Image (cartoon, grey):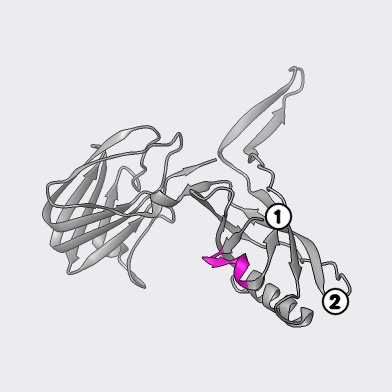
């Protein structure tokens, strides 16, 4: 029997069991086609991204611990506690997905003692590596970072500084920070700069675009000025 986790909360805590291995669904490449009259076939325009995928689990539950009505209440609370969440399972323990529950869930009622259902989660196409959520620390001496995957990643970069400073990644991504007294986060995924809930775009200048950690590539990291420490959360993923 398998296990599902929603934001770290295991299905086993409510007695829910996964009965079969989930199928692996490869995401669809996002593209557009245009037919040109008088020309055979269509022109294909790649959008440079992938569409969402569905992750399905056949599950069962029984009222061996508490009455069935209370049990189903706990299941629904587990499923609907978060709008979107980190989805993990015991079948791919090195990865997680970002998911939500797009449709209603119907459990069969076996004489009010147990039930079965199909849980179908809508997921972003990426399977994120768990170790890609571990931050890598750099001191003022800098260093390098190597993306071990075939896909570019969009890191979270936390810059600790006492005043002004500069970070350069790969020789062409440059981040200038001004008047920082603690830290600032540079988030390449949402292309924003903030410290806690405070927007810091006015104290950050990005040249060359928000940094991308390129696939299968080693990139140098250098710092200058009053930067005291750098933390990079790479967010590695595969498809």
* Quadrant in the rendering for residue 216: top left
Q: How many marks?
A: 2
Who's the residue at 66% across and 35% down the image? 32
The numbered mark at residue 82 is: none
First reached walking from the N terminus: tag 2 or tag 1: 1
Q: Which SS class for mark 2?
A: loop
Is any part of residue 106 visible from this angle? Answer: no
Who's the residue at 36% across and 73% down the image? 197
The residue carrying pointer 2 sits among few (fewer than 14), some (14 to 19) or many (20 or more) residues within 10 Å by Cα, namely few
Quarter of the image containing the C terminus? top right
Residue 218 in the magenta stretch? The answer is: no
- The x, y position of residue 198, in whole percent, is 33, 72
* Quadrant in the rendering for residue 118: bottom right
Residues at marks 2 and 1, CA–CA distance in whole angstroms: 22 Å
Q: Is residue 113 left or right of residue 159?
A: right
Q: Which SS class for mark 1?
A: strand
Q: Which residues are magenta?
A: 6-13
- The x, y position of residue 162, in whole percent, is 13, 65
Q: Nearer the viewer, mark 2 or mark 1?
A: 2
> What residue does disc 2 label?
112
The residue carrying pointer 1 sits among few (fewer than 14), some (14 to 19) or many (20 or more) residues within 10 Å by Cα, namely many
Quarter of the image containing the N terminus? bottom right
- The x, y position of residue 50, in whole percent, is 59, 42
* Quadrant in the rendering for residue 108: bottom right
State the residue in front, 164 or 9: 9
The numbered mark at residue 57 is: 1
- The x, y position of residue 163, in whole percent, is 13, 64
State the residue in front, 186 or 103: 103
Residue 7 in the magenta stretch? The answer is: yes
Is any part of residue 50 visible from this angle? Answer: yes
Who's the residue at 12% across and 51% down the image? 140
Q: Is residue 72 left or right of residue 51?
A: right
């Amino acid at each position: 029997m398998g296990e599902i986790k929603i934001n770290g909360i295991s299905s086993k805590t409510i007695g829910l069991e996964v009965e079969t291995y989930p199928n692996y669904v490869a995401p669809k490449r996002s593209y557009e086609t245009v037919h040109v009259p008088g020309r055979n076939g269509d022109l294909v325009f790649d959008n440079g991204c992938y569409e969402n995928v569905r992750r399905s689990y056949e599950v069962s539950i029984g009222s061996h611990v508490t009455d069935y009505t209370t049990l189903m209440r706990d299941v629904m609370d587990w499923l609907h506690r978060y709008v979107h969440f980190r989805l993990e399972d015991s079948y791919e323990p090195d990865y997680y997905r970002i998911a939500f529950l797009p449709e209603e869930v119907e459990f069969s009622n076996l004489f009010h003692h147990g039930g079965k259902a199909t849980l179908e989660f809508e997921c972003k196409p990426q399977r994120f590596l768990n170790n890609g959520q571990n931050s890598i620390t750099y001191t003022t001496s800098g260093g390098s970072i190597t993306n071990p995957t075939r896909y570019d990643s969009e890191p979270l970069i936390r810059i600790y500084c006492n005043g002004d400073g500069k970070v350069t990644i790969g020789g062409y991504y440059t981040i200038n920070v001004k008047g920082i007294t603690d830290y600032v986060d540079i988030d390449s995924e949402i292309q924003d700069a903030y410290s806690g809930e405070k927007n810091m775009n006015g104290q950050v200048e990005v040249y060359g675009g928000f940094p991308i950690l390129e696939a299968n590539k080693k990139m140098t990291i250098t710092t200058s000025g009053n930067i005291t420490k750098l933390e990079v959360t790479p967010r590695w993923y595969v498809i």
